[in-house]
Amino acid sequence: MLTSPTRFHWLQLPISRLVVAGLTAFGLSVMVPSSADANDYETCTGDLLTAGIAPAEAATACARALIPQDLSTCVTRIRQNAGVTATDALATCVQVRRPVDLATCVVGIRQNQQSSAIPEVLDNCRRSLLPVRYGECVVGLARKINSLTPTVAMNTCIDARDTRQNL
């Protein structure tokens, strides 16, 4: 016995064409970025140039960055909120894996411990494996112990020795 065509056989061809056309249009719209959208490298370079970094230095730094926009955010935040030159901020931000965390550390310490030396803050935040936590340590110790200088607080928090006694 022959099977008869379904009642809606006339819909199969147009619907399949519409599905293919729709998926193709969607795929093309996702694959082709809008010319108005800036990519991370463009944003990074623009931010560094605005901060006062030389064009060649900005190009090299952004091209080498794992996440370029994080690099420019680091430089911008440190420059604007911690009183550090853009060149010094960039020199430190390019040396870490998490530049935004570095900026959080530097800005936090500088805003709460204004007497702390900028080079020392940059170096200690850069050396810390967990810069946000390190910054919180420095600020927390210095807030509660008035006699603790920023340098002593930074040195205490950066000290990674295990002081537990072996039982």
Image (tube, helix red, strand yellow):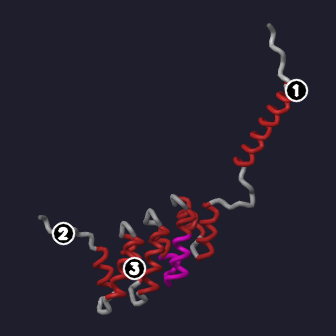
Q: Decide: marks 3, 2 in contact (CB < 8 A)?
A: no
Q: In this view, does 74 lie above or below 65?
A: below
Query: Closer to the camera, 1 or 43?
Result: 1
Give amino acid for label 3: Val
For disc 1, the marked residue is 10
Magenta region, mostly helix, strand or loop?
A: helix
Residue at mark 3 to residue at mark 2: CA–CA distance? 27 Å
Residue 87 in the image: state x and y as whole percent: 51, 76
Q: Quadrant of residue 167?
A: bottom left
For disc 2, the marked residue is 164
Residue 102 in the image: state x and y as whole percent: 45, 71
Give amino acid for label 2: Arg
* Residue for point 79% across, 7% down: 1
* Mark 3 or 2, closer to the camera: 2
Q: Magenta stretch: give its range.
A: 73-88
* Mark 2 or 1, closer to the camera: 1
For disc 3, the marked residue is 121
* Residue for point 51% across, 80% down: 85
Q: Earlier in the sequence, mark 3 or mark 2?
A: 3
Q: In which quarter of the image is residue 152?
A: bottom left
* Residue for point 43% across, 75% down: 105
In the rendered image, the residue lying farthest to the front is 1
Give amino acid for label 1: Trp
Apparent side of residue 164 relative to residue 43 in the rendered image (left or right): left
Answer few, some or many: residues within 10 Å of disc 2's Cα (few below 14, many 20 plus, some between 14 and 19): few
* Residue for point 74% across, 55% down: 34
Residue 32 in the image: state x and y as whole percent: 72, 49
